[in-house]
Amino acid sequence: MSARDEILARLRSALADDPPAVPVPRRYRRADDRPDLVEVLVDRLVDYRATVHSGFAALAALLAEVDRLAVPTDVPADWLVGHSGQVHRDAPPLTPAVLDTMDAVLTGCAVAVADTGTIILDAGPTQGRRALTLVPDRHICVVRADQVVGLLPEALTRLDLRAPQTWISGPSATSDIELNRVEGVHGPRRLEVVLVGGTSGA
């Protein structure tokens, strides 16, 4: 008998007399019907040091400042209005070295959680692959009003749980032992969120 087989046999023996699993009560809230979810999301994002804009006019103004822009292959053409620089579509996949030279990346998202200020990407439409949003120093993310939910359980129902996910709560940041904040260590140093649809200026 191999060491692996022996360990598994011991586990089976130890678990053989276990009582049946006890149901875990799940009485937590699964939905949030507050009317001000977008405002709550904005408050959380600003608290996390993200910059929040409203409407496609604001997006066009942001892109006018960008020269080298990385985008997923399926980014809508009307998102690029106002951009006159170089657009680098991620097909074939841009290398990390090329992504590192980009001034910004523009993507959409799968869902945004107002209560936690978290934006989640699951490699779905307009989101691209994970590297696209982790390497460039500036991430411009378009969030539609109908993608904003109140609570995490709501968000999970909208995700492809088999896909690689990126959860973003503000710009990438960490702190050392003296609690000095350091940004851009494992993701974009700047997060700019553009809210569209159902918001002022949309």
Image (cartoon, rainbow, N blue to C red):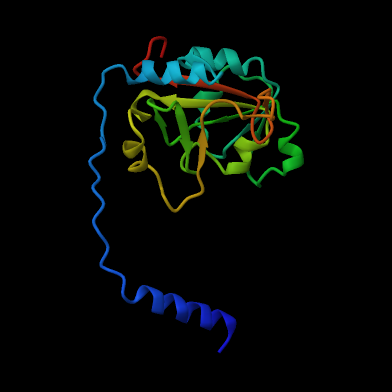
Q: Quadrant of the N terminus?
A: bottom right
- Which quadrant of the rendered structure holds the C terminus? top left
Q: Residue at x 24, y 25 (%)?
A: 33
Depth check, front residue: 111 or 24: 24
Q: Give the residue furthest to the bottom.
A: 1
Q: Position of residue 59 (x, y in %)?
A: 53, 17
Q: Left of 20 or right of it: where is 63?
A: right
Kindly indicate the quadrant of the structure image that contains residue 37.
Answer: top left
Q: Residue at x 26, y 33 (%)?
A: 31
User: What residue lies at 51% left-to-right and 24% top-to-bottom?
Assistant: 79
Q: Nearer the viewer, residue 135 or 102?
A: 135
Q: Residue 145: where, in percent of width, then height?
A: 36, 23
| Residue 82 in which image quadrant | top right
What residue sits 44% from the left and 53% below the top? 162
Give the x, y percent position of residue 111: 41, 34
Front position in the image: 100 or 25: 25
- How many discs mark residues in the rendered view? 0
From the viewer's perspective, tell me whether residue 144 is left or right of residue 66: left
Q: Position of residue 28 (x, y in %)?
A: 26, 38
Relative horizontal placement of residue 196, taking residue 169 as reference (left or right): left
